[in-house]
């Protein structure tokens, strides 16, 4: 029986501020929503590049940082590299100072999930992806042979390590697709919608003047999507196009330079990205990984005008009615030409408002976590 007392430990795989990419966006706005519901969050996060953030103390009762031990050989060992580099005895010691519930963010943070010292605690795992599927897809798009081999190896290790989820009292899937997969293998699986930064739909009426793709371009799946757009879609249109994101690959830079109608906006701020999303006529968001849910799609629907996606982007998300869904590059080009001069209507905006009033509501999702814990007390 958990001692909740409206206090909870959250173990994050990274420092969740600034909330500038998918995984930490969900973590940060989850903490914020729990804080607004009166929950005291004791945050534990691993550092490996991001700085300590004083802003976290505004929404957390305590913040603990741990160094991620990345010096180990990533090719050795049976445990996934993303797990064993987050194996800290000090974290376990801190967790055992009380008996509050524990929320593990992703398989990354589950090294201590099976430890006997916390066997009687109420333990939840937030699954941000089906990780071995994610790493298999990373391997498919990786061009460096050594990194490709690592991704394949890590996928096998993650597949084997996934069994540790049977020790969780609750598994929180980020999408209906992932929930269906996890329910075939484990008990006590719930769908918990992604947390996000948007309070209200801010879509601007009227028309924009360019097409936009945005994402963290150093991530393989985003690089693949951007390359697909340059080669198969944007370069074959006479419309102004922008690709925005951090650390684009050299190949992407070279290809964009050859196209007069495509602009690459590098290493910009979150606010600048949001401004681009709002000003674009169409947010173009293909993906080739139907895992998890893409928070950039939620942002585009809260902030932007038309949204053109491919089928994997909206697979079993419930968002398909708010987007124009295309099956291939030809359909995508046709949709972009058709929508480029079409104003977004007040009816379109109201449809989004009605949908998001009932779905992806941070306060309701935070209450869902609280209810799961309180139910376990009885």
Image (cartoon, rainbow, N blue to C red):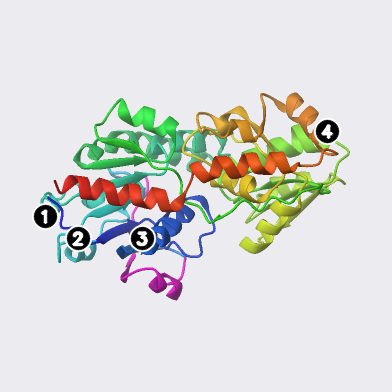
Q: Are marks 1 and 2 in contact (CB under 8 Å)?
A: yes
**Badge 3 element:** loop
**Residue displayed at 52% across by 39% down:** 145
For residue 306, say whether it is visible.
no
Magenta stretch encompasses residue 53: yes
Work out whether residue 52 or residue 158 is closer to the camera in this orientation and state it.
Answer: 52
> On screen, 30 above or below 221?
below
Q: Are marks 3 and 2 in contact (CB under 8 Å)?
A: no
Q: CA distance from mark 1 to mark 4?
A: 60 Å
Work out whether residue 378 or residue 123 is closer to the camera in this orientation and state it.
Answer: 378
Q: CA distance from mark 4 to mark 2?
A: 56 Å
Is tag 3's residue or tag 4's residue first in the polypeptide sequence? 3
**Badge 4 element:** helix
- Label 4 crowd bin: few (<14), some (14–19), many (20+), radius 10 Å: few
**Disc number for residue 37:** 3
Q: Are marks 4 and 2 in contact (CB under 8 Å)?
A: no
Picture coordinates of residue 18 (x, y %)?
Answer: 51, 64
The residue singled out by tag 2 in the image is 92
For residue 280, say whether it is visible.
yes
- Residue 151 falls left or right of residue 117: right
The residue singled out by tag 4 in the image is 337
**Residue displayed at 33% across by 60% down:** 69
Q: Are marks 1 and 4 in contact (CB under 8 Å)?
A: no
The residue singled out by tag 1 in the image is 117
């Amino acid at each position: 029986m958990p001692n909740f007392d409206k206090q909870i430990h959250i173990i994050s795989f990274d420092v969740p501020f600034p909330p500038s990419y998918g995984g930490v966006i969900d973590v940060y706005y989850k903490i914020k929503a729990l804080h607004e519901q009166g929950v005291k969050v004791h945050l534990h996060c691993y550092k490996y590049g991001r700085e300590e953030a004083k802003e976290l103390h505004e929404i957390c009762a305590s913040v603990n940082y741990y160094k991620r031990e990345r010096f180990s050989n990533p090719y050795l060992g049976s445990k996934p590299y993303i797990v064993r580099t987050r194996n800290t005895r000090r974290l376990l010691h801190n967790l055992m100072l009380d008996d509050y519930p524990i929320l593990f963010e992703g398989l990354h943070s589950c090294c201590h999930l099976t430890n006997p010292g916390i066997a009687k605690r109420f333990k939840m795992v937030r699954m941000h992806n089906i990780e071995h599927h994610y790493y298999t897809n990373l391997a498919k798009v990786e061009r460096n042979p050594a990194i490709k081999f690592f991704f394949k190896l890590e996928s096998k290790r993650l597949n084997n390590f996934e069994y540790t989820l049977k020790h969780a009292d609750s598994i929180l899937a980020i999408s209906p697709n992932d929930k269906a997969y996890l329910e075939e293998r484990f008990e006590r699986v719930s769908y918990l919608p992604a947390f996000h930064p948007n309070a209200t739909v801010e879509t601007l009426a009227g028309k924009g003047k360019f097409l936009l793709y945005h994402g963290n371009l150093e991530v393989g799946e985003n690089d693949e999507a951007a390359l697909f757009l340059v080669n198969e879609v944007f370069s074959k249109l006479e419309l102004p196009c922008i690709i925005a994101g951090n650390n684009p690959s050299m190949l992407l830079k070279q290809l964009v330079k050859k196209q007069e109608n495509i602009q690459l906006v590098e290493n910009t701020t979150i606010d600048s990205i949001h401004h681009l999303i709002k000003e674009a006529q169409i947010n173009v968001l293909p993906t080739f990984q139907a895992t998890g849910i893409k928070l950039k799609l939620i942002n585009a629907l809260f902030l932007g005008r038309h949204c053109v996606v491919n089928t994997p982007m909206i697979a079993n998300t419930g968002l398909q009615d708010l987007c124009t869904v295309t099956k291939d590059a030809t359909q995508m080009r046709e949709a972009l030409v058709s929508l480029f001069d079409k104003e977004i209507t007040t009816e379109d905006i109201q449809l989004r408002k009605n949908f998001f009033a009932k779905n992806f509501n941070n306060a309701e999702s935070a209450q869902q976590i609280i209810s799961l814990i309180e139910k376990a007390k009885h």
